[in-house]
């Protein structure tokens, strides 16, 4: 059954224009929390950045001459150990080569930190890398709460209220985190900020997409990606300038509380209002939009205004006629759809794991960590352009396979680059981030095209939620570099290679109408059996 309100609304939106004055004003408001989200998703990288430190040698500290370091600390590769020292000879309180027994290596009694700013120094996390990387994992684990919670709020109370509340939670808990007095307090606020506030981005995204008709969504999506990337690139610049993680948190999180004003400034989604039967409010907003854009849509508004609202009793009646079985239960009985959910979830996990893993590990590359992170963010701009250019020309399946394989080859290839070739390593690294970004953008589109309309949003939510496993584990990958510098990249490449093989299981969806029923979705896997009309 075709939704009459959707048809009328799309026709009205087409008349209003994709980006008339009304939508420009609303997009200007919505892009602000999206810009902030670009910083919030990776701030832990600079909050808890690894810094220089070593074992504290009491009898040698304070000397201007530091030549004693090579006598007191063992080498690990080509660097002095950060967490081990040579045992001091009992009774020798001087500071010289003769003070230390180079045959006995012990752990640090205390840590001597550099002047670099990080929670590592403030909370004495030296030689406890698992605690440092756990901060990012705890932050991203909050997404398992925020996505369904904000989704429920958005569907029940409206988009703008969900956006305002989530942004307020970002501001409160992010700002409060800057006053943390110990590690436990910090990670608690880290989790609460993500669990209650990270949904602001998805809510703003949905509202932005619902503002425009079908022809405006591609440009809207591209604009959102650019602004998010701009926020991502702003973060290392601010961190580099401030050199103070507490001040950084206060500066980036305080503006989020301003979004609470959107309850009064922003108009509600017309699509959401129509779905709730609040047709009068929807018509008033559309009249306002028409007035701002200087367009007459009065004839198109009457059918919406007079539309009959479906009562709950009628919905229950339809359910009884269908045997009381929900579409979601029916779809789970399909082996083809179940397999598709598993494969799509793995593709999503791979994208988030490699995407966030490469961003997080970029600060460990040779050279300036702030510049490296900016470049890793900047490469997403041409990647999103490339995605728009190639997907409709060469198909989803072929592009995904090529991008996964390319990402795998580039990541694994890093291990064969000599350490002194820093520029070449950076180019290979950025190319790997470029390819996985194209794959990530493609997965968003591709996954939405292989499931039936009746359960598309639900199955998309399942794949997206499971995909957060990748972003939750990604902050822990720097620990792999403790064993071998390029081990994280080899791990990323192996996972991407596996994903490229799994794409072969899925059907091509280029120029194929979106499936509305389970049967149509299943037939995507058997294109040859479908006769031409």
Image (cartoon, rainbow, N blue to C red):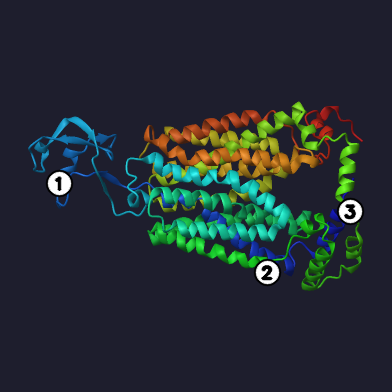
Q: Within 10 Å of the Cα at label 2, are there few (<14), some (14-19), or many (20+) other Cα atoms? A: few
Residue 191 coordinates in the image, percent (x, y): 51, 48
* Residue holding disc 1: 60
C-alpha gap between disc 2 and disc 3: 30 Å
Q: Nearer the viewer, residue 210 or 407?
A: 210
Q: Which label sits in the foreground, 2 or 3?
A: 2
Asked if the residue under mark 3 is in contact with the one under mark 1, i.e. CB atoms within 8 Å, the reply is no
CB-based contact (under 8 Å), mark 1 and mark 2 = no
Residue 497's place in the image compared with 158, above or below, is above
Seen at 50% across and 50% down, the residue is 42
Mark 1 and mark 2: Cα distance apart in space: 63 Å
Residue denoted by label 2: 264
Marked residue nearer the N-terminal end (1 or 3)? 3
Q: Which residue is mark 3?
A: 4
CA distance for labels 1 and 3: 81 Å
**Farthest-out residue, front:** 313
Question: In this image, 468 relative to 3: left or right?
Answer: left
Mark yes or no: residue 45 visible.
no
**Secondary element type, mark 3:** helix
């Amino acid at each position: 059954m075709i939704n009459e309100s959707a048809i009328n609304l799309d026709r009205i939106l087409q008349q209003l224009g994709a980006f008339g004055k009304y939508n420009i004003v609303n997009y200007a408001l919505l892009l602000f929390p999206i810009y902030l989200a670009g910083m919030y998703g990776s701030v832990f990288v600079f909050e808890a950045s690894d810094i220089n430190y070593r074992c504290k040698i009491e009898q040698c500290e304070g000397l201007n001459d530091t030549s004693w370091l090579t006598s007191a600390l063992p080498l690990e590769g080509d660097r002095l150990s950060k967490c081990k020292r040579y045992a001091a000879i009992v009774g020798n309180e001087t500071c010289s080569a003769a003070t230390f027994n180079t045959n006995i290596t012990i752990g640090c009694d205390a840590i001597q930190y550099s002047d670099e700013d990080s929670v590592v120094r403030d909370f004495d996390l030296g030689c406890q890398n698992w605690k440092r990387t756990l901060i990012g994992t705890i932050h991203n684990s909050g997404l398992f709460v925020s996505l369904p919670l904000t989704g429920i709020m958005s569907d029940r109370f409206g988009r703008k209220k969900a956006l305002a509340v989530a942004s307020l939670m970002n501001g409160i808990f992010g700002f409060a985190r800057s006053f943390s007095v110990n590690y436990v307090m910090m990670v608690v606020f880290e989790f609460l900020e993500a669990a209650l506030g990270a949904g602001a981005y998805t809510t703003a995204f949905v509202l932005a997409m619902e503002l425009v008709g079908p022809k405006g969504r591609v440009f809207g999506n591209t604009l959102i990606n650019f602004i998010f990337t701009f926020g991502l690139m702003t973060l290392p610049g601010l961190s580099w300038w401030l050199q103070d993680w507490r001040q950084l948190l206060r500066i980036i999180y305080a503006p989020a509380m301003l979004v609470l004003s959107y309850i009064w400034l922003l108009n509600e989604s017309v699509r959401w209002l129509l779905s709730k039967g609040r047709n009068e409010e929807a018509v008033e907003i559309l009249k306002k939009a028409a007035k701002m854009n200087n367009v007459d849509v009065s004839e198109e508004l009457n059918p919406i205004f007079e539309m009959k609202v479906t009562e709950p009793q009628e919905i229950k009646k339809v359910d009884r006629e269908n045997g009381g079985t929900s579409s979601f239960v029916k779809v789970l009985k399909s082996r083809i759809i179940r397999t598709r959910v598993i494969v799509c979830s793995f593709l999503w996990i791979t994208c988030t794991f490699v995407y966030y893993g490469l961003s997080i590990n970029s600060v460990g590359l040779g050279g300036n960590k702030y510049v490296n992170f900016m470049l890793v963010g900047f490469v997403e701009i041409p990647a999103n352009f490339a995605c728009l250019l190639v997907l409709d020309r060469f198909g989803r399946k072929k592009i995904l396979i090529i991008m996964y394989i390319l990402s795998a080859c580039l990541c694994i290839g890093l291990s064969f680059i000599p350490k002194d070739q820093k520029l070449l390593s950076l180019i290979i690294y950025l190319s790997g981030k470029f390819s996985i970004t194209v794959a990530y953008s493609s997965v968003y589109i591709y996954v939405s095209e292989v499931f039936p309309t009746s359960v598309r949003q639900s199955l998309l939510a399942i794949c997206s939620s499971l995909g957060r496993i990748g972003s939750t584990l990604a902050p822990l990958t720097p620990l792999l570099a403790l064993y071998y510098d390029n081990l994280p990249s080899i791990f990323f490449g192996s996972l991407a290679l596996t994903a490229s093989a799994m794409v072969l299981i899925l059907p091509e969806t280029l120029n194929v109408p979106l499936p509305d029923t389970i049967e149509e979705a299943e037939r995507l896997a058997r294109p040859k059996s479908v006769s031409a009309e």
